[in-house]
Image (cartoon, grey):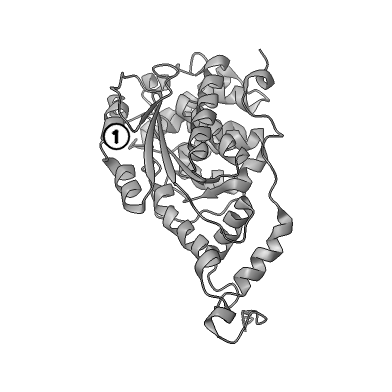
Amino acid sequence: MSQKDHIRHNPNDIPGLDWGLRKQIQDKLDNKAKPVGSLGKLESLAMRVAMIQRTLTPALTNPVMLTVAADHGITAEGVSACPVEITWQQVLNFLNGGGGIGLFSRLYGLDLWVVDAGVNFDFPDHPKLINAKVSKGSNNFLYEPAMSMEQCMKAFNNGCHIVADFHEQGTNIIGFGEMGIGNTTPASALMSILCGIPVAECVGPGAGLDGEGVSHKTRVIEQAISKQGISGSAFDILARYGGYEIATIAGGMMEAAARRMVILVDGFITTSAMLVAQAMNKRVLDYSIFCHVSNEQGHRKMLEYLQVDPLLSFDLRLGEGTGAAMAYPMLQGAVAVLSEMTSFDEAQVINTSHIRMEIPAND
């Protein structure tokens, strides 16, 4: 069973950005009634969204937040300070509009959906719950692969199909978050292998481990990698050490990029899914906005490895998609600059776009 035959996407599926449009977008930004470059990162955001959408008048339509949930067999090794029951309890909380992601999605106008990718619980039907359960939790990857290749492919392709459905309903921007007790452990393992960084530099406290707990989690991951080995295939690495929510998010990211959607990347776990996706096709990064750098120690190094600049630095470490939701209003502002802000001509203000700001040299 070959990877190419069963994974929904191949390296040719994601289109490149139209770099020829860049000058037109920049000219439009520079002709707004303001000093050139004075809106800083907001202008860079506007440029990115306009290039993704191939237009000088970008718009964000039907924004969706997907919070993807799953359980993890590796929690049997005591790598989390929290009971595993919190996963399914929080899913129910989110479905009732609770939690950080329920609050911020409602506050900022994102349509929140919760995806059951592999929670060890039978949920009742709910209009905002997407049932994409592959299995009731991944395997304990200290002893065996977290997922079989077939299971991993199913989770990955589930993410593709979910995103495709939203795109066909008019969504052009989608955020990814996660919920899963113990999921900083697979994320740390994926980071260590895919970034080539020692495990000890990838592991953090997660939901509240003390120093000894962090050391124990580090040892567990190191032992697992020693037993399971390292493959040259990013997808195989995902199957050995990942989780159902991470695989589902990775597939969703690939589908979103293939459909020229804006991708909002949340924190440590979500970025681990991006590490897998970009290892399969680096073009996915062109469609991605990295919303914040979290307070989980490995996240900053992940972002440095990807050579990306996050929008926020608020010491968040909640997950769920909360950082992505908090960053969404910035994208709204960026798009409005290009599409709605008055130009020099419209405002009847003398055009100063030829004047470039200069920073005086230090004495």
Quadrant of image for the N terminus = top right
Q: Is residue 338 above or below residue 83?
A: below
Residue 322 or residue 233, whichever sits in front: 322
Residue 224 or residue 18, whichever sits in front: 18
Query: What is the residue that sits farthest to the bottom in this orientation?
Result: 350
Residue at image point 59% right, 25% down: 237
Element on which disc 1 rests? helix
Instruction: Where is residue 343? Give x, y as percent.
Output: 56, 76
Instruction: Where is residue 305? Give x, y as percent.
Output: 61, 45
Q: In this orientation, does residue 201 appear?
A: no
Q: Is residue 326 left or right of residue 189?
A: left
Quarter of the rendering containing residue 121: top left
Instruction: Where is residue 43? Give x, y as percent.
Output: 56, 65
Q: Is residue 7 above or below residue 19?
A: above
Q: Is residue 342 left or right of residue 258?
A: left
Quadrant of image for the C terminus = bottom right
Which residue is disc 1 drawn over?
A: 95
Instruction: Where is residue 49? Give x, y as percent.
Output: 57, 55
Q: In this orientation, does residue 204 appear?
A: yes
Residue at image point 60% right, 60% down: 47
Three-letter code for the amino acid on which mark 1 is drawn:
Leu
Task: Please state the total of marks drawn on the protein image.
Answer: 1
Crowding at dot 1, Cα within 10 Å, few <14 / some 14-19 / many 20+, comes out as some
Q: Is residue 87 above or below residue 121?
A: below
Q: Is residue 26 above or below residue 134?
A: below
Residue 239 or residue 105, whichever sits in front: 105
Residue at image point 46% right, 62% down: 333
Quarter of the rendering containing residue 73: top left
Residue 68 or residue 292, whichever sits in front: 68
